[in-house]
Amino acid sequence: MENIARYLMLAGIALFLIGGGVYLAVKFGIPLGRLPGDIRIEGENGGFYFPVTSSILVSVVLTIILNLVERFLK
């Protein structure tokens, strides 16, 4: 039971950090979701949106952060 509590606390901290990152991105004017390379198709009855460039950028940043955390914990 103690392990579950630890994982829930880590997940909460991770969500807090992600939320803070999104907040700071909006505050500093980083247009996540509206970068060049994001696919947006709008029609009369609906639309399709796939943030390719934003996904790659978030992936690179998270990879760097997780590698730093892993090196710090070893």
Image (cartoon, rainbow, N blue to C red):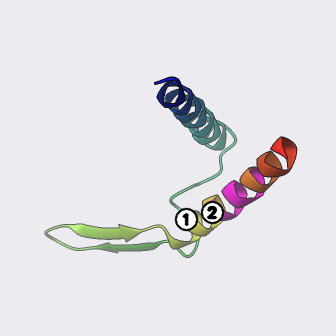
The kind of secondary structure the magenta stretch mainly shows is helix
Q: Nearer the viewer, residue 71 or 13?
A: 71
What secondary structure is found at the residue carrying circle 1? helix
Residue 28: image quadrant is: top right
Within-10-Å neighbours for mark 2: few <14, some 14–19, many 20+: few
Q: Which residue is mark 2?
A: 59
Residue occupying image coordinates x 19% and y 67%? 46
What secondary structure is found at the residue carrying circle 2? helix
Residue occupying image coordinates x 59% and y 32%? 10
Residue 16: image quadrant is: top right
Q: Are circles 1 and 2 on residues that touch, CB within 8 Å?
A: yes
User: Bounds of the magenta span?
Assistant: 59-65
Q: Which residue is mark 1?
A: 55
**Structural distance between the alpha carbons of marks 1 and 2:** 6 Å
Q: Amino acid at mark 1?
A: Ser
Q: Is residue 26 above or below residue 4?
A: below
Q: Amino acid at mark 2?
A: Ser
